[in-house]
Image (cartoon, rainbow, N blue to C red):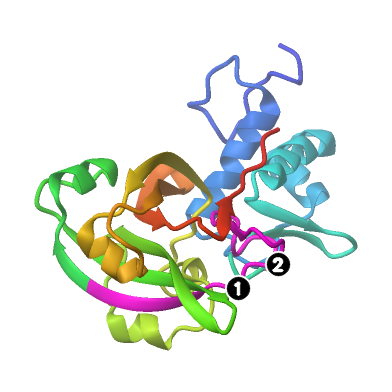
C-alpha cells in the first residue's frame, strides 16, 4: 500500500481507500470538535502535527490547506495557523450576502424583537435533528440599513436553535452583546458555525411581515432559508429570513 493511501494509525475505522491527507483532516476536525483547539487559538505547526500523526509534513499541509479553503482554519503569515473565528472581519459576515446596490460596505444594525424557549415545531425539529417535542430557542430580529438619514428594515429573521446547546440564551443576553451573533454563539455557548446550506425563492410580503419591514403587503421579497452546521455535520441553526432588496442585492461567488 502506498504512503498516499495508507490508513492513519490513529483512525482505525477509516476506509482503506481514504487518502491519507483526508484521514489527517478527519483527525484535525475531531480535535476541533472535541475542543482541543478553540476558535482564535493557534494549532500546532505542520512539523509537530506530522510527528504526532506519523505522516509526512506534506500530507499535513494538504489537510490543513483544505481546512483553510473551507474557512475552518486561517493561515497567518509568520504567525501560524489558527482556528477560524467569527470575530475576524474576514469571516464574521461570511454567511450574510446582502450588499447595498451603491457599492458601499454593509452597515447593518440589528433590532431584536423576541427570544423565547418553546417546543420546536415538527419541521424545525426535523431540520435540526431534534427529538419530537424537544425544546428550541426562537429568536426574531430585524436588520436595518442606513438609507439617507434613516435606518430602514431590510431583513426579517427567524432563528431556531437547539435548546440543549443554547441554555441561558435570553433577550437580555442578546441585547447586551456587541458584535456578530455567531461570535456570541462560539464565545459563550461553544457552538462554531463552519458551513451552511441555503434555499432561496421569491415571495410576496404577507400583512404581518410587511408591517415589520415597513413595506406594502404584496411587496416582492427574497426568502432565504439557511441551515448552519458545526463540526461533524451537526445542524445547529435554522434561519428563515425575508430580504427586501429594493436597494440591496444578494451576492454569491461561484468557483
* Mark 1 neighbour class, 10 Å CA radius: few under 14, some 14 to 19, many 20 or more: few
> Against 4, is 171 above or below?
below
> Against 101, is 13 above or below?
above
Residue 165 seen in render: yes
Q: CA distance from mark 1 to mark 2?
A: 9 Å
Q: Residue placed at 61% from the left, 59% from the top?
A: 99
**In terms of image quadrants, where is residue 217?**
bottom left
Please tell me whether mark 2 sits on a helix, a strand or a loop. loop
Residue mark closest to the camera, 1 vs 2: 2
Horizontal arrangement in the rendering, residue 134 relative to residue 4 (left or right): left
Question: Is residue 105 inside the magenta stretch?
Answer: yes
- Quarter of the rendering occupied by the C terminus: top right
What is the magenta range? 89-115
Question: Is residue 143 inside the magenta stretch?
Answer: no
Q: To which residue does mark 2 refer? A: 104
- Quarter of the rendering occupied by the N terminus: top right
Residue at the limit of the structure toward the left, as seen here: 133
Circle 1/circle 2 CB separation < 8 Å:
yes
Q: Main secondary structure of the magenta part?
A: loop
**In terms of image quadrants, where is residue 122?**
top left
* Mark 2 neighbour class, 10 Å CA radius: few under 14, some 14 to 19, many 20 or more: few
Depth check: give the residue in front, 254 or 87: 254
Residue 97 seen in render: no
Q: Residue 10: x, y in percent?
A: 58, 36
**In terms of image quadrants, where is residue 53?**
top right
Name the mark on residue 37.
none
Name the mark on residue 107.
1
Horizontal arrangement in the rendering, residue 35 relative to residue 18 (left or right): left
Amino acid at each position: 500500500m502506498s504512503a498516499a493511501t495508507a490508513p492513519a494509525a490513529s483512525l482505525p475505522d477509516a476506509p482503506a481507500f481514504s487518502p491519507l491527507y483526508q484521514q489527517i483532516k478527519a483527525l484535525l476536525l475531531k480535535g476541533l470538535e472535541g475542543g482541543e483547539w478553540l476558535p482564535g487559538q493557534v494549532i500546532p505547526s505542520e512539523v509537530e502535527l506530522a510527528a504526532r500523526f506519523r505522516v509526512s509534513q506534506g500530507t499535513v499541509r494538504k489537510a490543513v490547506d483544505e481546512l483553510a479553503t473551507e474557512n475552518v482554519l486561517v493561515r497567518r503569515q509568520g504567525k501560524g495557523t489558527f482556528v477560524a473565528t467569527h470575530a475576524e472581519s474576514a469571516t464574521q459576515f461570511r454567511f450574510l450576502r446582502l450588499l447595498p446596490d451603491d457599492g458601499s460596505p454593509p452597515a447593518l444594525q440589528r433590532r431584536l424583537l423576541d427570544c423565547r424557549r418553546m417546543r420546536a415545531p415538527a419541521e424545525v425539529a426535523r431540520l435540526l435533528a431534534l427529538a419530537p417535542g424537544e425544546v428550541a430557542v426562537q429568536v426574531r430580529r430585524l436588520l436595518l440599513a442606513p438609507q439617507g438619514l434613516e435606518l430602514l428594515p431590510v431583513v426579517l429573521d427567524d432563528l431556531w436553535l437547539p435548546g440543549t446547546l443554547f441554555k441561558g440564551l435570553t433577550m437580555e443576553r442578546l441585547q447586551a452583546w456587541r458584535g456578530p451573533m455567531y461570535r456570541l454563539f462560539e464565545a459563550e455557548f461553544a457552538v462554531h458555525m463552519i458551513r451552511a446550506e441555503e434555499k432561496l425563492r421569491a415571495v410576496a410580503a404577507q400583512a404581518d411581515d410587511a408591517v415589520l419591514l415597513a413595506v406594502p403587503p404584496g411587496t416582492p421579497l427574497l426568502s432565504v432559508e439557511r441551515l448552519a452546521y458545526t463540526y461533524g455535520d451537526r445542524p445547529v441553526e435554522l434561519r428563515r429570513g425575508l430580504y427586501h432588496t429594493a436597494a440591496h442585492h444578494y451576492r454569491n461567488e461561484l468557483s
